[in-house]
Amino acid sequence: MEQLIAGLSAKSTTVVKAENTASAMGSGDLTVFATPAMVALMENAAMRAVAHALPDGSTTVGAEMDVSHLKPSGLGTEITATAVLAEVDGRKLTFHVGAHEATGMIGEGTHIRYVVDRARFLMKI
C-alpha cells in the first residue's frame, strides 16, 4: 500500500451522451454536458487517485466541491477529468481537479474528500 502523499493523481473519461446532458439531468434545458456530470467525473478521478493508498476497510467521501464550468461540450465529445492530490491534513484530502476535451479546458477547481472507515460510515445511515 502506498502512502497518501501530495502528487497522487488519476483520470476518468466519459463521452457526452443524452443521459449526461443538462436537459436529461435537470440542471438545464440544453443538450450539452451537464455540470453535475462534470462534477461526478472529477469526484471519480479524485476517489481513484488515492484508493490504492488507503488502509484496508477505508474509502473516501466527497465533502466539498468548488468548480467553474468554463465552456459547453456537445454530444459525442470525449471528456477527461483529472484529479491531483494537493494536500493531506489528517483525514482531509484536498485535490486540484480539472476537466478537458480535445479543444481545451472545460472546467477546473478544488475538491475536498475525507478518509473514512467504510463500516463506521455506513452505520451512520
Image: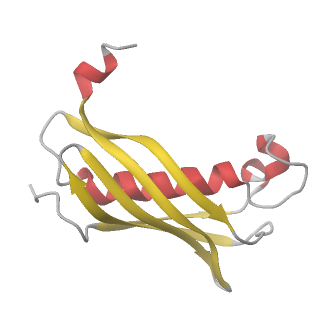
- Tell me the residue at 66%/48% (across/down): 36
The residue lying furthest to the bottom in this view is 103
Quadrant for the C terminus in the image: top left
- Towards the viewer: 13 or 89: 89
Query: Colour scheme in the image?
Result: secondary structure
- Towards the viewer: 103 or 94: 94
- Towards the viewer: 13 or 72: 72
In the picture, measured across the screen, residue 32 lies left or right of residue 81, that is right
Against 34, residue 116 (above or below) is: above
In the picture, measured across the screen, residue 115 lies left or right of residue 40, that is left
- Tell me the residue at 55%/50% (across/down): 40
Query: Would you identify the image quadrant in which residue 74 lies?
Result: bottom right
- Tell me the residue at 60%/75% (across/down): 100
- Tell me the residue at 70%/70% (across/down): 70
Q: Position of residue 14 (x, y in %)?
A: 59, 62
How many numbered circles are shown? 0
Against 54, residue 123 (above or below) is: above
In the picture, measured across the screen, residue 73 lies left or right of residue 62, that is right
Q: Position of residue 84 (x, y in %)?
A: 35, 68
In the picture, measured across the screen, residue 45 lies left or right of residue 27, that is left
Q: Position of residue 56 (x, y in %)?
A: 13, 38
The residue lying furthest to the right in this view is 29
Against 32, residue 104 (above or below) is: below
Quadrant for the N terminus in the image: bottom left
Query: Would you identify the image quadrant in which residue 71 lies?
Result: bottom right
Q: Position of residue 101 (x, y in %)?
A: 64, 77
